Structures are given as structure tokens and as C-alpha cells.
Amino acid sequence: MEFVTYEVKDRVGIITINREKALNALNSQVLDELSEAFDGVDQSQIRCLVLTGAGEKSFVAGADIGEMSSLTKAEGEAFGKKGNDLFRKIETFPIPVIAAVNGFALGGGCEISMSCDIRICSDNAVFGQPEVGLGITPGFGGTQRLARLVSPGMAKQLIYTARNIKADEAYRIGLVNQVVPAAELMDTVLKMASTIAANAPIAVRNCKKAINDGLQVDMDKAVVIEEKLFGDCFETEDQKAAMANFLEKDKEKKLKVVPFNNR
Ligand code: DAK
């Protein structure tokens, strides 16, 4: 792959968008390669993923404006679908994905970070949906995910004004989980990823699915979703071993974590 790299550290996979000259802007090739990278993750071994951008200046400075500038309506729709399909793949990916936002997260950059489960950003990060200044709407789910993540009023303000916000404001409105000095970003993210990776994988996956699926339906249906995913954890080796450890008061015993495909 030309613009995307993938590396594994213990049970954590790191996907990096590596198109630094264009501030990691998302063209069709980057979108295709990202999709391929997610498809290639060994889900029997990897427990958490990190998505980041190459360099110190930008996470993703948006969809590629050069490529978009000459699109017809039909091509624009196809480009939007390519992005939306990828972002849904990330959002519904069975294992958690943390965005390590290392600088500009504008337009499609803000949108791809919002398709991740958790956003941790460097103190030089800048977020925004500048699309209306370019004569378009956010096209990779920005109108939908921003309104759900912050609030409809705040999402409308940011999208209608096309105003960029800095890391501290992104934290204040709940767009990011944590802001850290740039030099500490990857360590902080990897530490959180390792913490997640050390927990029972079936339970973690079921939590992600319960939260995602439950948010789409009313509370009566949502609790049924939770019940089923809760029940699904029983009789797994993780559940049996972890509860036995507790009951035996054996704090030294480590949670026995089994690869998912061995359940
Ligand atoms: N696309 C393409 N190239 C980009 C880019 C982008 N979004 N952002 C930056 N670059 C390139 C610049 O052209 C420049 O390339 P060279 O001139 O060196 O060849 C290089 O990256 C460095 O950028 P600058 O020289 O501009 O760097 P500065 O530090 O001066 O400024 C900046 C950094 C991030 C403030 C500035 O680059 C900037 O404003 N970039 C554009 C940010 C932006 O507006 N992003 C949102 C794009 S719109 C849809 C699908 C998707 C979308 C919408 C609809 N459907 C199909 C419905 C999504 C839209 C967007 O994401």
C-alpha cells in the first residue's frame, strides 16, 4: 500500500494514514487502502486498533479537495459512498478503534475521527467541518455523527459557521475524550489501547455492539440488545475464569483471555 501502513504492538494494531505531503488528505486511493487495512486485521489476535496520521502537523486535513473539485454529481455521490462505507466499517468494526488525532482534523478528518470509538488528541489539534465554505455539505457522516456526539445545537453552529476549533474547545464540547501534549500522544493512546486489550475480548466487543446498536433504537429495544449481549458472555472461558478468580480471592491469577475464534 502506498499511503497506509499497519503495524502491530502486542495485541494492538496501529493503522497510519501516510500522505504527509497533502496533510494526509483522503483521496480515493487512501480510502481504498484504509478499507483494505481494516479488512486485513487479524481479529483473532488484535484486541484494539489505533488510527492516526503521519507527521506532527495533521491527522487528516479532509477529503482531497483536488480530487473532489472536478467531480460530477454522480461521481460525488460515489465518492461519498466510498467514504461512508469505510467509516461505517470503522464504526462497526468488532474491536475498539481509538483515533490518535495528531493535528488538523478537518472535514473528512473530523468525520473519520468520529467514526472511531474514542478520540484522544494532541494539544495542537484543530477540528472543524469547513465544507459549507467549499460549497458542499459534510459528506462522510459529519452532519449525523457530530450531532450525536456533541449536541444538535453545537453541531449546527460548527457546521453552519465552518469555524475551526482548537483542542481545548473540542474537549469542552465532548468531541474528544482527552487532550495531551503532542509528544505524549502515542504513549497515552497505546497505554489506553493496552488497557482495553487486557480485558476480556468477548465482553469488550459485546460492549461496543451494545452501545452502538442500542443508540439506534428506543430504550425498550435497547435493553433487550444489552440483555442478549450480556447473556452471550456467559459460558465463555473469560467469564468462567474471571469470576472463579474473584470467588477464590486469588488476585495474582491473571484473567485468562482466549482468542475470539476459540470461544
Ligand atoms: N485536500 C487536498 N490537499 C490538501 C488538503 C485537502 N483537504 N489540505 C491540505 N492539502 C495540501 C495543500 O494543498 C498543500 O499541498 P502543496 O501545495 O504543498 O502541494 C499541502 O497539503 C500543505 O497544505 P498548506 O500549504 O495549505 O498548509 P498550511 O499549514 O498553510 O494550512 C490547512 C493547513 C489544513 C489549514 C490548509 O491546508 C487547509 O485549509 N486545508 C484544507 C482543509 C479543508 O478545508 N478540509 C476539508 C476538506 S472538505 C462528500 C464527501 C466528502 C466530503 C464532502 C462531501 N460527498 C461526496 C458528498 C468531505 C469534504 C471535506 O473534507
Image: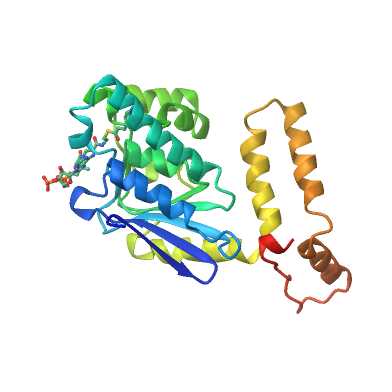
> Ligand 1 is in which quadrant of the figure?
top left
Q: Position of residue 155 (x, y in %)?
A: 42, 27
Q: Position of residue 147 (x, y in %)?
A: 48, 28
Q: Position of residue 159 (x, y in %)?
A: 35, 26
Vertical comparison of 24 with 222: above or below: below
Residue lying farthest to the bottom in this orientation: 252
Vertical comparison of 190 with 114: above or below: below
Colour scheme of the rendered structure: rainbow
Q: Position of residue 56 (x, y in %)?
A: 26, 58
Q: Residue at x 49, y 33 (%)?
A: 150
Q: Answer left or right for 167 relative to 206.
A: left
Tell me the quarter of the image containing the N terminus: bottom left
Instruction: Confirm whether residue 200 shows in the render.
Output: no
Q: Residue at x 27, y 49 (%)?
A: 24
Vertical comparison of 158 with 28: above or below: above
Q: Answer left or right for 149 relative to 164.
A: right
Q: Residue at x 58, y 61 (%)?
A: 47
Q: How many marks?
A: 0
